[in-house]
Amino acid sequence: MPAPSKPKPPAEGRNAADLDLGAVPRRDVFRGLAALGLGLAATPALAREPAAPAIAREEFRVPTGEDGIELYVRNKHPAGQARFAADRILLYVHGATYPASTAFDLPLAGLSMMDYLAGLGFDVYLVDLPGYGFSSRPKQMDRPAADNPPFMRTADAAKAVGVAVDFILKRRGVEKLDLMGWSWGTSTMGLYTTTHNDRVNRLVLYAPQWIAKAPPNLGTSGPLGAYRTVTRDSARDRWLKGVAGDKRADLIPAGWFEQWADATWATDAAGAASSPPVLRAPNGVVADSQAYWQAGKPLYDPGEIRVPTLIIHAEWDADLPSYQAQEYFTQLTNAPYKRFVELGEGTHTVMMEKNRMQFFREVAAFLQEAEPQALN
């Protein structure tokens, strides 16, 4: 994690209590004062806060065994540490359109969610599915979209996640890990968990997909080809759909959308060569939405999830509205315990908005807590 900023040393004739604390966050001020030997007795909790460890980053290309397709897997963990308990290892997968690598590990204001969790001592992984991000592009993407049917259905995505899980478990010599999915990624992780409960410690479902009352907000219509294309302008419109006009201005801090879009569109060289530049995304998710979620049929049974589960959602999510998260929560009939958290003033992409630290902390609290049903 980035080193905290330090205030200027107090001028001659002034003491720590005279400093202007309004210029920088109080937590950073007190950390800086402690470094200067000027810690305040009134802030014992802050004085005890441990420094974040240095973070190591590793990247892997993991063969899937299918047509030369490889998964891109990224890992961040405290530097110098190679052994982790199963409950300190997390794998994240993305949603329908954008890769994991440019959202979960996007250093907005110098800090990504992946950095945040690694700074807490987690061994954190992300995976881009085939056709997304830095993973291999299947051969269907070498042809016009209309030449092939949709690919990368949810079952295919869950199979790919299984490859990543097996890789991580073998690498770390453990039998279980935590899983986190966003949007369509909740279906991927949910489906995987129903058949592999023995490999999952805890499950985080961010904006879960469930039975829909309207078509998905993906800009698709007409016959489905192998993939669809998305422009930066359409991505921004989708992001802000459903947000009141007077709330839009400060929802995404200045420069954050552009930082995310630059990183995301750069992962698709072929799409970037178009005019205007586009991002290509597999249409398997749309085909599944039509066959299952829009048709009123669950693709899998959340009742088969038998691990502790967190549902986390934001109130302005127009892609997968609150009713879907609430109804999904009721289907978790066999989880040892479950929790639903609804965040205010956030959209489907709250992880990259002004209230993202609330999101980070809720997820971290769930992953780190002791057994919540114990008497303590």
Image (cartoon, rainbow, N blue to C red):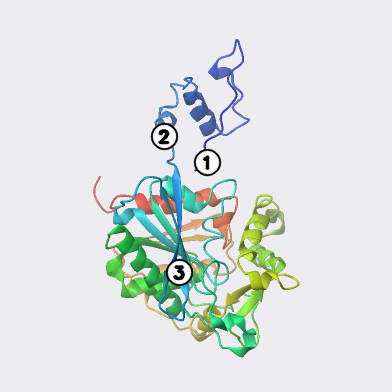
Kind of residue at disc 2: Glu
Which label was assigned to residue 49?
2
Determine whether the residue tagged by mark 1 lies in a helix, strand or loop.
Answer: loop
2 or 1: tag closer to the N-terminus: 1
Kind of residue at disc 3: Thr
Q: Nearer the viewer, residue 227 or 305?
A: 227
Q: Nearer the viewer, residue 328 or 24?
A: 24
3 or 2: tag closer to the N-terminus: 2
Mark 1 burial class by Cα count in 10 Å: few <14, some 14-19, many 20+: some
Please say if 366 is above or below 185.
above
| Residue at the spot of label 3 | 186
Say which quarter of the image contains residue 352.
Answer: bottom right
Which label was assigned to residue 292?
none
Determine whether the residue tagged by mark 2 lies in a helix, strand or loop.
Answer: loop
* Disc 1 from disc 3: Cα separation: 30 Å
Decide if residue 359 is in sight here. no
| Residue at the spot of label 1 | 2
